[in-house]
Image (spheres, coloured by chain):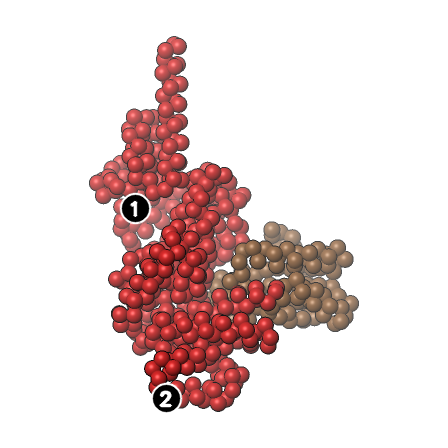
Amino acid sequence: MTDPDWIDAALVSARPQAMAALLRYFRDLDTAEEAYQDACLRALKSWPEKGPPRDPTAWLILVGRNSGVDAGRKRSRQTALPSDDVLTDLAAGLDDAETALAERLDGADYRDDILRLLFVCCHPDLPATQQIGLALRIVSGLSVRQIARAFLVGESAMEQRITRAKARVAKGDTPFEAPSPTERAERLLTVMAMVYLVFNEGYSAGGVEAGARRPLCHEALRLSRLLLRLFPAEPEVMGLTALMLLQHARSPARLDADGLIVLLEDQDRGRWDKAMIAEGLAMIDKAMRHRQPGPYQVQAAIAALHARAERQQDTDWTQIDQLYAALERMTPSPVVSLNRAVAVSKVAGPQAALEMIAPLEERLAGYFHFHGLKGALNLQLGRDDVAREAFQQAIALAGGAAEAAHIRQHLDRLQADGQKNRNAVSEG
Amino acid sequence: MLYAILCYHMEDVVGAWSPTHDEAVMAQLGAVRDDLAARGRLGLSARLLPTTTAVTLRKDREPPLLVDGPFAETKEQLLGFYLVDCDDLDDVVATARELARANPGGCYEIRPVADIWKSNGVHGAGA
């Protein structure tokens, strides 16, 4: 690996922990970020000459802390000395300080530090897109340009969004004291939801957007593995990681050459990423051993059943139906019931599924997938007119070109079949 | 003599590689492996899934305790291994250097193998 490659990877991987420690130290996101960036600049100068430090993260934290303190003194024109432990670190020389700091990092602190860093990005006043933008900027260290590209907005718009989000976070009272176990669990749940949002921003895109958004999936997976290292025995974190791995594994088969979404049942399973599936399956196995089921684990277990079916017709729909039933109990929502209806249609037929989704119509009237499924079920039952109407409603609600195009195929087929039938009638 | 070359690296650094970079490294390692195999020197070799998938069975108590994660929190983690048949220490170090040129960063622990038990199954069965 060339120097810049090595340094890039080291800086990227050190970022969450270093930023988290600097945030605790300076208690201010902007100062922490400036200090970290300064440390990175120094690393780019110093590492190629002197070789990589033994512990890049500790090096960045220490250098960032010193530079932040310097900057703070210059800004405030104060002559106050930095705190005692900084002086001790400086006096002991960088290398010893590095060792001491690294030892401290191994302690329990850094887990809460990183969780806090992720948690401040999830400020409840921030809309989801701002939470994600902030997390990608602050925690993952993506550039504003990279984030803007992934969200398909202009760079200055994204810059503004992140600046506003930061200002909002700065106004709030970031909790710096160590959280209680209950608070820690709540923070973890909030952060997991945000990580899954990042993933879905990347995963749900189709068409030309898919390539640009793919990095979001990678970032979400990296964040999730980070959480897993912090909370190695937390089954829901395993479930979330497994869920994302198993979904992401299908990416190579999920879009056709024109960027249109290929339904799960039509995907070329040979193109699924086998290493990712292996990792996802290992992860959900581990999680289930704890016997503390949760929504992420159940969704991952469903994805695992799809991953384990070598052919579409091998899918264990009965078990998928049961898992969706469990998910309905844990997180009741019309969308979950709609998903369950797909499994029901495979187990008990389209009529049973239609009966199941009928009561959802009112709440899902504005939901693309409701009308898509309603159309498909009616199509199976040969009720072409009802199907056509449902598909037309779906098209009107489609969230992107790929979704619309998929429904359009159904409509075109219906049209062609209708034509054929009429011809057959006139000929007969 | 048989040696195990155990590959250690910081997992989060390797995890921060871009997919393109990862593929490039794997291709370079593949070339070294192919060369070793052509000379009849390569045994089983493997890249391991991340330590986040690991469980550890602590058997220093009864009943043994299964815990999540790798056996120890270390800065560098065991990410893979090679079994190679080399003439002597110089030879295996030269081999490790070749691998290192293909994949710098981290370290290789070189351990002579005491015994190897060939059994049915696993060895040839997997992918």
Q: Which mark is residue A34?
A: none
Q: Position of residue A151 (x, y in %)?
A: 39, 52
Q: Is residue A359 above or below residue B100?
A: above
> Are labels 1 and 2 assigned to the same chain?
yes
The amino acid type found where label 1 is placed reads Val
Tell us which disc is closer to us: 1 or 2.
Answer: 2
How packed mark 2 is, by other alpha carbons closer than 10 Å (few <14, some 14-19, many 20 or more), is: few
Q: Which residue extends farthest top?
A: A428
Q: Which residue is at 31% across, 47% downward?
A: A336
Most foreground residue, A235 or A138: A138
Q: Which mark is residue A79?
A: 2
Q: Which residue is at 60% across, 75% downward?
A: A49
The amino acid type found where label 2 is placed reads Thr
Most foreground residue, A364 or A55: A55
Image mark 1: chain: A
Left or right of A102 on screen, residue A294: left
Q: Secondary structure beneath disc 1?
A: helix
Q: Which chain is red?
A: A
Q: Which residue extends farthest left?
A: A362
Q: Is residue A241 visible?
A: no
Left or right of B38 on screen, residue A141: left
Q: Which residue is mark 1?
A: A335
Q: Is residue A123 above or below residue A26?
A: above
